[in-house]
Structures are given as structure tokens and as C-alpha cells.
Image: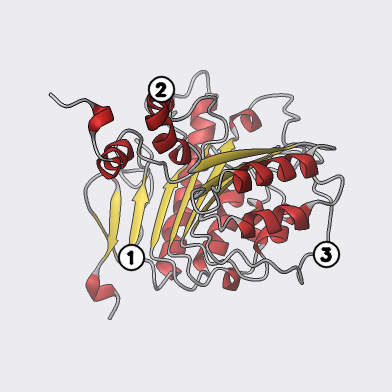
Amino acid sequence: MASLEFLATELLLNIVQYVETPEEFTTINRSEEQPSLKNLSLTCRRLRAICFPLLFRSVKLPLENGHSRRSIKELLCFIRENALERTVESMGLAMGPQWNGGKVGLDLKKFLWEISVKSLSIRQYRTHLGLREKSARWPYFLAALERLRLEEVDDDNDLKMLLLKQCPIRLLHVNDGSFRSLYEEDDNYFLGRAEHGPGIASFKPSVFPNLTTVVYHAAWPPYNRFGSFLEFVSKLPAIKVLEVKLMGDEDLELDLKRKAYKLPPDAVRFREVVSAYQILAWRVGTMGSLQLLVIRDHRIPYHGETDPPQSFAEGPLGTYQRQKDAQT
């Protein structure tokens, strides 16, 4: 039986490609990624040389106050020294509080432009208030960017620095986080910001002429926050697929029974979500280009609590397809 070390380099490269399938986005919060590929790269020098570039298809960049410029410079030097410019496909930005204290927004955009990143993930703190920079005339258009994932990004300033004046993405994934504490006493976490939509919703939809697929996941968002995001989505010129999850996988064991003339917290949260689904049903009816609505919640309010969207027929697994006669 032939050993791996005797195989041609082309065959080894094909085999290694199947060890780890790259994800669509860089997962910022996960501590360890690609363990199988890392372990394989440690077996011998030849496999290390083959695996090394693939280990950096997905890269994270932490940005902290006072250290952002150095972090960008060090990562860029590493990429250049190892000829990884054409290897990096997905980038994850972890933006700490006041990360842009030294006005490094232009440096960051130039860096992303230089490596021609295709997939970008951005994670922020809810209470983050970015340093305002006049970025509308900045160069370095991110022409290669195809996918954008936003995790709890309420502020629009950092997004404008990177995306204006036009953004070519085809997929937008918004992970809006959990709003469960809004329904609990003495909540100070959101500081009145929860009612506003995600930062991306403040953009003009015309900035995204190629955006065809939008994914919105959250746990118990206020219906007016979700509604402002849907208003943005409804005006996208090329939207075809919309996917939503509003209960964050917490809807399997809801306690909705009234107790002592008082609604339990689950019932209050669920009532808010039903209102959000009513807004969703109305909004998708106004999106002439939308072809498919996908519901990822386990308990779908359209099954008894409120009416489903008109001109859409329900299919398997929470899918709603636009009826052909509704388009004529």
C-alpha cells in the first residue's frame, strides 16, 4: 500500500481540500477552527507546506483601542511575507470599544482592498459609538466582496467607512443577537438603542445593487426594530430570498399559559414575535422581486396565530414560495 508521502503533490492537494471545508463566513467568537487541517499540517514537512496556505483561507483581526493600526500592519506583513494575498478569502473583524481611536479606518479599508477579501464578518459591542470620519470620498472600493455578516452591529458609522459608496455583496447575514433581557426588570443593557434597527438598515438600499439574499437571525427582537430592518430590505432592488429566525431556537418549550390573570414572560415575548410576523407578512407582499421566504423558527406563527403572506404558497420546512400567478 502506498503511503501519503509517495503521492504526487497534485493528489495530496486534492485530498487536503476535503479535510476541512471552508465556511461561508469567519466565525469570530469560536476559539479553535480547522482542527483537522491543523493536525494534518503537523505530521510532516511536506504536508505542512501543502496545508499551510489553506489554514489561512479564514483570518481573524482583533481591533482594540490603541492597537488597531499595529494589528493591521502586523497581519498585512504576515500575509505578504507568506504570499497569502490570493489565499485569504474570509476575514473576521472583532471591533472592540473605541477601536478607531487613532483614525485608522482608511488603513483598514486599504488592507481589505489589498487582499481582495470575498467574505467579511464584523462583530461589535452593542454600546459601541464609533469615531466619525468623513469617508464618502475614500478610495479602495472593495470590488471582490461577495458576502457580509454582521453580529450585533448597531452603529452604522464603521460600516459606512468600509462599504460606501457602493457595495457589491450578494449575501447579507445579520445576526442581531438576543433581546431577551428587554422583557426582564431593571434592564440597562441596551440603553434605549434596541428600538432602532441594525446599523445596516440606515443605508440607502441603492448601495447594494447586487444583493439577492438576506438572512436575519435574532432572539426576541422588538417588532418595530425588526420592522425598520424589513423596510430597508423591501427597497433592495434585487432581493430574491429572505430568511428569518426571530426566537433564537428558544421556541420549543414556551410557557404561554396565563397564570393568576398575568401573562408569563414567554407569552409576552411570543406576542411581540407574532406582531413581527404580521409585519413580515405585509412587507414581503410589497417586495415584487422576492421569490422565496424561509422561516427558521420551530414554532411558526403562520400556523394559527396570524395570517401567512398572501401570494406565497407554503412548502416544506418553513419555506414560502411566491406563486407564479401572483407575478403576472
- From the viewer's perspective, is residue 308 above or below residue 189? below
The disc, 2 or 3, on the residue closer to the chain's N-terminal end is: 2
Q: Gap in Å between the C-alphas at discs 2 and 1?
A: 43 Å
Q: Which residue is mark 3?
A: 134
7 horizontally vs 228: left or right:
left
Q: Give the distance between the C-alpha atoms of the residues marked 2 and 3, in whole angstroms.
A: 45 Å
Tell me the kind of residue under disc 2. Asn
Residue 308 in view, yes or no = no
Residue 245 placement, left or right of 83: left
How packed is label 1: few (under 14 Cα within 10 Å), some, or many (20 or more)? some
Question: The C terminus is located in which quarter?
Answer: bottom left
Look at discs 2 and 1 and give the one toward the viewer. Answer: 2
Q: Residue at x 39, y 72 (%)?
A: 289
Lower position in the chain sequence, tag 1 or tag 3: 3
* Foreground residue among 296 and 75: 75
The disc labelled 1 sits on which kind of residue?
Gln
Tell me the residue that label 1 is attached to. 291
Which residue in the protein does label 2 denote?
A: 39
Instruction: State if disc 3 and disc 2 touch (CB < 8 Å).
Output: no
Where's residue 6, x and y in %? 24, 31
